[in-house]
Image (cartoon, helix red, strand yellow):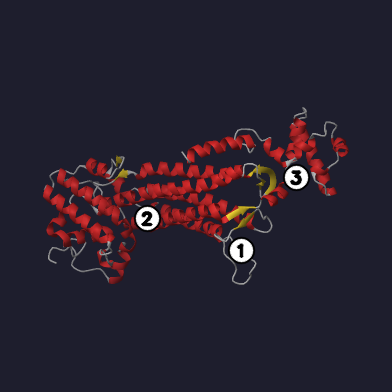
Amino acid sequence: MENALTKTWSDRFDKGLNPFIEKFNASIEFDICLLEEDLDGSIAHARMLGIQGIITKEDAIKLENGLKQIRKEASNGCFKPDISDEDVHFAVEKKLIDLIGPVGKKLHTGRSRNDQVGTDLRLWLRKRIDEIDMDLERFQKALFLLAEQNLYTLIPGYTHLQRAQPLSLAHHLLAYVEMAQRDRNRLKDVRKRVNISPLGAAALAGTSIAINRKVTSSELYFQDIYSNSLDAVSDRDFVVEFLGASALIMAHLSRLSEEVILWASEEFAFIQLTDRCATGSSLMPQKKNPDVPELVRGKSGRVFGHLQAMLTMIKGLPLAYNKDFQEDKEAIFDSVKTVKNSLLAISILFEEGLIFRKERLDRAVSSDFSNATDVADYLVAKNIPFREAYQLVGRIVKTSLEEGVLLKDIPLERWKTFHKFFEKDIYEKLLPSSVVESRLSFGGTGFERVQEQLVLWREKLFK
């Protein structure tokens, strides 16, 4: 077609790109994901051009209708750019000219692909942040509902992966709910800096055309506008921040996954995996494998890698726009996909993929020395200095290990040989439920404190 846009560049260029370089240079294969956002930004830009009188209102309407037609064709599968279109922005402009003729050539007035791509990416990421927030909330709810059912279920607590003190299982699960809330808060904070409009910064220096950046910013629901055109087109801090927040989400999921993997082993046997979220072995018929947490644990490395790649990419770039920025999209697209899929998989796992084996947990918290600190606390309550009590209990534990007896099985007469202040009530103090119940400091695992937290979290998550 005579009016079609046949090449990206000006008439300064006589020859086309080498076919391999054309493919190497193109981003259409992945940035087509930004089509909806590119259309939204272009419609806002066209409206602004009409409002400002830069083009006629009739031309602005033609541009908007043409862009809406592209959206319709895309939804019907009829808009199929290829490698010759280079990127989504050029593909849209080319198609627009095909649809409405020379008026389509007015769309790019007062803007560059540099501010255009920055706008598209921010619009796209803003939506994804909102989606991930909902995914995190579902994850929190899955953990919370299990916690609410298991306030009085006890589980061994560990430091250095050594038995430390018994915990309410609800308290353990709520620790991850707290982590997820920090993740949500971080994303909310990142979103503020994503939600700033670079549109109108043009290539790097602004434009002499009398555009109105406030109009496009308002049309696209941005909360602010970049005040420096150089910064606007070259800022990828928001990408790094998002990837950093995503890396922490994956780190938290990976920690939880590691615990699930351990809990599912015969050595721990704290949970039973249901058939809904586990697979078997192609050779060993007795096995049930924790594939979901293993995959999430493995996928965390993808997001960590994207964060490192992005930091490496931007660290040496002079102002303003550089082609290196094309590398931000695949990293952020893949990270969003990985985070969303991992959150969904873990949520399903805790909704229907595992069952806590309470009888095994009961045996676990009753067959170790994790109540030793409570013996020291017992003596402290009788005005014995803690460090003195601590050393004494260490000797008692050593003797008990040598004799193969647990603290709860030491006769009272033997307790009195260790210290005269020991009385019959020591046995009540040694019960795992008493150990947990006594941890009533704010934020502790005591049942009263955990119940308070359950009430607060129910109000937050189900309001």
Q: Give coordinates of residue 441: x percent, y percent.
A: 63, 33
Relative horizontal placement of residue 452, taking residue 248 as reference (left or right): right
Instruction: Identify the residue shown where x is 38% and y is 44%.
Output: 191
Task: Note whether 253 is above or below 392 in the view shown.
Answer: below
Residue 351 visible within the image: yes
Q: Residues within 10 Å of mark 2 (few under 14, many from 20)?
A: some
CA–CA distance in space, label 3 to label 1:
31 Å
Using residue 307 as the reference point, say whether residue 325 is left or right of it: left
User: Disc 2 marks which residue?
Assistant: 328
Residue underneath mark 3: 369
Name which residue lies at 53% across and 49% down. 252
Local SS, label 3: loop
Identify the residue position indicated by label 1 in the image: 288
Q: Which of 42 and 144 is in front in this view?
A: 144
Amino acid type, residue under disc 2 in the picture: Asp
Q: Look at the numbered discs 2 and 1 and tell me whether their residues touch, using CB distance below 8 Å.
A: no
- Give the label on residue 21, or none: none
Residue 33: give x, y in percent of width and height: 33, 58
Q: Which of label 2 and label 1 is nearer to you?
A: 1
Callout in the foreground (2, 3): 3
The amino acid beneath tag 3 is Phe
Residue at image x 25%, y 67%? Answer: 84
Question: 37 or 113, which is in the foreground?
Answer: 37
Residue 267 image offset from top left, x and y in percent: 69, 57
Q: Distance between the residues labelled 2 and 3?
A: 52 Å
> Residue 175 placed where, x, y %?
57, 43
Q: What element carries label 2?
A: helix
Q: Which of marks 2 and 1 is nearer the N terminus?
A: 1
User: How busy is the neighbourhood of tag 1: few (under 14 within 10 Å), some, or many (20 plus)?
Assistant: some
Label 1 SS: loop
